[in-house]
Each structure stands twice: as C-alpha cells, then as structure tokens.
Amino acid sequence: MEDVPQPADEPYQPDDRVRVYLAEDDPDAEHHGHVCVVEERISDSLGDETVAPPTATPTD
C-alpha cells in the first residue's frame, strides 16, 4: 500500500486499500490506523459531517 497524502489527491475507488487517519479528538478516533478496502464511493466535503454509514471493510 502506497503512502498517500491526506487528503488524497484523487478520490478513492472501490477495491482501493486505505489506512484511516483521524485525530485523537475525532468522534470516530477508534478507527484511526485501521486498513480498509473501499466498498463504495459517496460525495462528501471535508467541511461537512457525513451522515452515511461507513463504506469500507476493515482488513486488519
């Protein structure tokens, strides 16, 4: 798995393996460091909260 800058230059695609990076004070911080496979891509912006369920499957 390559080291991709955060946020990524290009959107992730289904079947991409990604590592989750979150701050300690993020409500979802329990997922920091997990490696996942993207199952679905949805539109989102970094400034808005996503209300959709997670769309990646942990592989670690």
Image: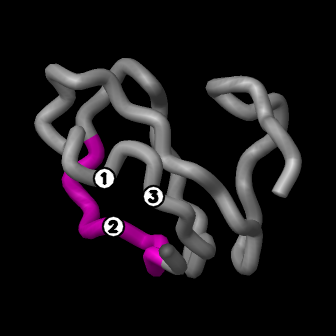
Between residues 23 and 16, which one lies in front from this camera angle? 23
Contact check, label 2 and label 1, Cβ < 8 Å: yes
Give residue 54's mark: 2
Q: Is residue 54 found inside the magenta-colored segment of the image? A: yes
- How far separated are the C-alphas under marks 3 and 2? 13 Å
Identify which amino acid the numbered label 3 is placed on: His
41 horizontally vs 44: left or right: right
Q: Where is residue 1 in the image (x, y as percent from the top left)?
A: 83, 57
Q: What element carries label 3?
A: loop
Whether 9 is among the magenta residues is no
Q: What stretch is highlighted in magenta?
A: 50-58
Tell which of 17 and 53 is nearer to you: 17
Q: Is residue 53 above or below residue 23?
A: below
What amino acid type should be assigned to the residue bearing mark 1?
Answer: His
Residue at image position (74%, 47%) is 11
Q: What is the CA distance from the residue labelled 1 to the residue labelled 3?
A: 6 Å
